[in-house]
Amino acid sequence: MPKKTHPRTIPAPATKLTQQIRHVELEFVTVYDDFCAFTNQNAFFCDAISAMAQQREILPRETVGGIIFHCDWLKSRTADIRLAMGSLHAQLQEIR
């Protein structure tokens, strides 16, 4: 007896909800990747500051300037990531 074959089903077009979910998923991956890179840079900076503090030497002006610049950058990136996460949160609430 021959096998019964099922007709090929054509996938339904993506609904608005499906599109919204996919957009949030892609945005989440981007924010997550940015956050991982940020935490790695933050850990490196903390290790560097800790090593300098243990030397108990007066830091050159250029080093102090670099530390201040990097601290400002860390604060800015933290705000950027917080905004991106807030946007994702709002989008998820909207989908619900």
Image (spheres, rainbow, N blue to C red):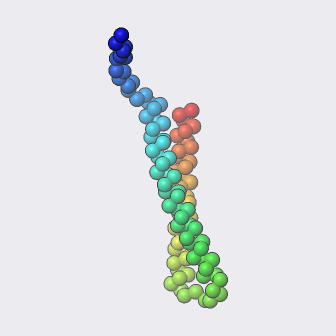
User: Image point 48% across, 48% down: which residue?
Assistant: 29
Q: Look at the image and tell me whether residue 74 can be seen.
A: no
Q: Is residue 36 left or right of residue 13?
A: right
Image quadrant where one finds the N terminus: top left
Foreground pick, 40 / 59:
40
Q: Is residue 53 left or right of residue 39?
A: right
* Vertical placement of residue 90 versus 33, above or below: above
User: Image point 37% across, 14% down: which residue?
Assistant: 4
Q: Residue furthest top?
A: 1
* Vertical placement of residue 75 versus 30, above or below: below
* Vertical placement of residue 9 versus 37, above or below: above
- Image coordinates of residue 38 in percent, x first then y, are 52, 62
- Image coordinates of residue 86 in percent, x first then y, are 56, 48
Q: Is residue 21 left or right of residue 4?
A: right
- Image coordinates of residue 26 in percent, x first then y, are 45, 44
Residue 92 image-quadrant placement: top right
